[in-house]
Amino acid sequence: MANIIIPTPLRKFTANQASVETVGGTVQESVESLAKQFPDLNKHIFDAEGKIRQFIRIYVGDEDINALNQENTKVENSTVISIIPAIAGGAQ
Amino acid sequence: MAQVNFSKQELERYSRHLIIPEFNIEGQRKLKKAKVLVVGTGGLGSPLLLYLAAAGVGNIGILDFDVVDDSNLQRQVLFTVDDVGKPKSEAAKARLQKLNPHVNFTVHNTMLTSENALNIIKDYDLVADGTDNFPTRYLVNDACVILDKVNVYASIFRFEGQVSVFNYKNVDGVNGPHYRDLFPTPPPPGLVPSCAEGGVIGVLPGIIGSLQANEVLKVISGVGDPLAGRLFLFDALTFETRTMKVHKNKDTPAITQLIDYEIFCGLGEKENDQEVKEITVEELSSWKVTKKDFQLVDVREGYEYEIANLGGQLIPLGEISSHVNDIRSDVDVVVHCRSGKRSADAILQLEKLGFKNLYNLKGGILAWADQLDPEMAKY
């Protein structure tokens, strides 16, 4: 069980929900649970090999999962997972 | 450091800085001596430039190639109605000189490119990146890494903002993470729209650009803890703020030269333009006048249709694949969007399914407004 915060560019795939409750004991299971609820998200988060895309960072709390145990990082009921995409707006 | 002196007018002007114990006149001297390049004078550049100039940053470079447009004024508070049509960098300088005549402004009325970036940035101590596209983001980052400059970064999209300080050298002389450590590669074109396509709430660049200006002042003055190795996130809709850790990535390749950033971001190959058939707005107009039997399909979103439309059948790009049966194959079909980009994507999708009768409206509804209907609202 974790709460995943959805970034603005991906909210169109989650019926505009800013956060989604997921099931699973790891980051991988949580994100898969999210993608199962919102299948259109799949291709935006995972590449063809099922790996998380490079322009997206996944955080548990304030820490990058790459500095933890990657996708196998454990989550608990109170865990907040953030999906952080690159955005580029500013001048226009 | 050569002694930096202040006139009576400057001392009075900056007095609210001078009486902050940890900032004081030493901090102000550092500001006056500093050379900061602001890349992009739009939504983020507006508050950035206003606050940096007001605060007394002594040498400010203003880089932008664009001209002021009516649609800028919703958030680009640097400009007024009188500036519409003028080069942004020139209009910005004129406004800022009135705000603070003690600052030296340098105008770069040009696009930052792989050819000119190193030559422009080398003369500055720090770059504040307020651009609006991925190629320039990576270009600014790489140029700052090569030249060993701090890159104070901010980015916005709709209701969401990001701020960080990249390539910051700490007291031990070790450089912190940079943009490529956070995002090694850009998203594929079209996934994350620009503000021109995706929209942005007007006050958001004011909030985020002000935070960016604050980080610039902190880095220059040495006061406080800069947002190095951290990424600040703000969601204006939920009022959630988060500060995430950013680490150096051992897999980030060494940056030794600038590359073609359009190609790096997947924008270099103009396949769409070459592959799809096009018609001009004049041709479409004559088809309408002669009552030719054809279908007009609009692949924008419903809220865009509300602003302006050509009476086409609305099928947003994301729904094309589930509305294939609504596209006629017995007559010519003209597909259009705002500028011609999304409609080209739609045509490529449909041609893979066997359609051969599709024409992209060149320049989209913007071209129609420009060339045929001056009353039509552009956005």
Image: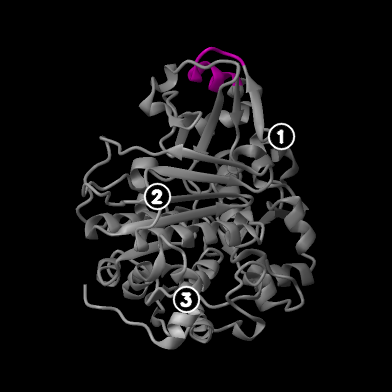
Q: Is residue B190 above or below residue A21?
A: below
Say which label, 2 or 3, has the lower sequence index.
Answer: 3
Q: Is residue A46 above or below residue B362?
A: above
Label 1 environment density (alpha carbons within 10 Å; few <14, some 14–19, many ≥20): few
Quadrant position of residue B280? bottom right
Quarter of the picture holding the C terminus of chain B: bottom right
Q: Disc 1 designates what residue?
A: A15
Q: Which mark is residue B14?
A: 3
Tell me if B153 is positioned left or right of B240 in this view: left
Q: Residue at x 69, y 69 (%)?
A: B378
Tell me if B368 is positioned left or right of B87 in this view: right
Tell me if B60 is positioned left or right of B16 in this view: left
Q: What chain does badge 3 belong to? A: B
Q: Secondary structure at mark 1?
A: loop
Q: What chain does badge 2 belong to? A: B
Q: Is residue B39 above or below residue A12?
A: below
Q: Disc 2 designates what residue?
A: B225
On the image, the x and y values in percent for residue B220 come to 35, 63
Alpha carbon separation for disc pair 2 and 1? 38 Å
Give amino acid for label 1: Ala
Give amino acid for label 3: Tyr
Q: Secondary structure at mark 2?
A: loop
Check if mark 2 and mark 1 are on a common chain: no
Q: What residue span does the magenta drawing correspond to?
A: A23-33
Label 2 environment density (alpha carbons within 10 Å; few <14, some 14–19, many ≥20): few
Give amino acid for label 2: Asp
From where the camera sits, is residue B310 visible? no
